[in-house]
Image (cartoon, rainbow, N blue to C red):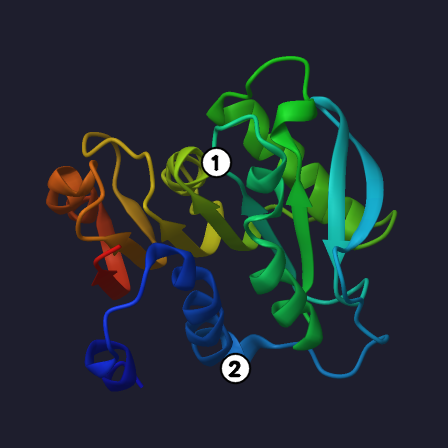
Amino acid sequence: WLLPLSAAPVLPLVSLLPRLLAVLVLLLLPVLPAGGAEPSAGVGREVVVPTSLGDLHVREFGPRGGRVAIALHGAMREDWILHEWDGAAAALGEEGFNVFLPNLHALPSPPTVTPLFAALLDLARWAGGAGGAAETLPLLMGKSWGGGLAGEIAALPGRPVERLVLVAPALSGKGPAIECEAAVFWAEDDSSFGKVAAVRGRLTHEILFHTEAT
């Protein structure tokens, strides 16, 4: 199923997320939840979740109780940044995932990796109900700054992330190996593309790497 991606015409960077979604649905089809409540649509449901970092303002898509997916936004303090995952989140919600888009800019200060992981686990446990005992994140996605955070969370000891999706991640090429299954998307003319080989060197189970020009 990789062939249609490599054979597709060159598209602008803004097209990455819908294409990413199609890949995710194919990639994760074996673990899609069966049944469940009707998924949400539009811009998601606004919820506030208590976590170890304080109240986390989140938009939620899909049926509560579905397989949890979390997507982290980029660093710019612009409203559109908070909505860059909306299309993918809505479509994954229609496939039965319970998708969360946290607003990291609403936290008192920019989060660091280990405290953020703890807060995202709190979110996953909250999504699973009061008795939830999540110790790993089933699907973590991130773009740019959020991609760097997602990658470093996945590199923490103990395989904390099952599957990882990175879009043009602001991720260092130096650091511990990222051992979960990972899909990476990058624009060939992105200013950070020069470090792509180093970043990929940290991925021990890369199952998809796709580039295109903006």
Please state, as top left, top right, bottom left or bottom right, where the N terminus lies in the image. bottom left
User: Which labelled disc corresponds to residue 30?
Assistant: 2
**Residue 60's x, y, as percent?**
75, 53
Q: CA distance from mark 1 to mark 2?
A: 29 Å
Q: Quadrant of residue 44?
A: bottom right
* Image quadrant occupied by the C terminus: bottom left
Using the image, determine if residue 156 lies above or below residue 46.
above
- Sequence order check: which comes first, mark 1 or mark 2? 2
- The disc at residue 149 is none
Eye-nearest disc, 1 or 2? 1
Q: Is residue 177 visible?
A: yes
Q: Which residue is mark 1?
A: 74
Q: Is residue 132 visible?
A: no
Residue situated in front as seen by the camera: 71 or 32: 71
Q: Residue at x 71, y 38 (%)?
A: 122
Left or right? Give the position of 131 relative to 150: right
Left or right of 72? Residue 91 is right
Q: What residue type is disc 2 on?
A: Pro
How packed is label 2: few (under 14 Cα within 10 Å), some, or many (20 or more)? few
| Residue at image coords 83%, 36% | 48
Image coordinates for residue 65, horizontal then vertical, percent: 79, 64
Q: Residue at x 46, y 37 (%)?
A: 146
Question: On the picture, is 61 further left or further right than 129?
Answer: left
**Residue 160 vs residue 51, the one in the foreground:** 51
- Given the image, on which type of amino acid does mark 1 rest? Gly
What element does badge 2 sit on? helix
Say which element carries label 1.
Answer: loop
Residue 85: image location, x then y, percent: 56, 53
Instruction: Give the x, y percent position of residue 40.
Output: 80, 67
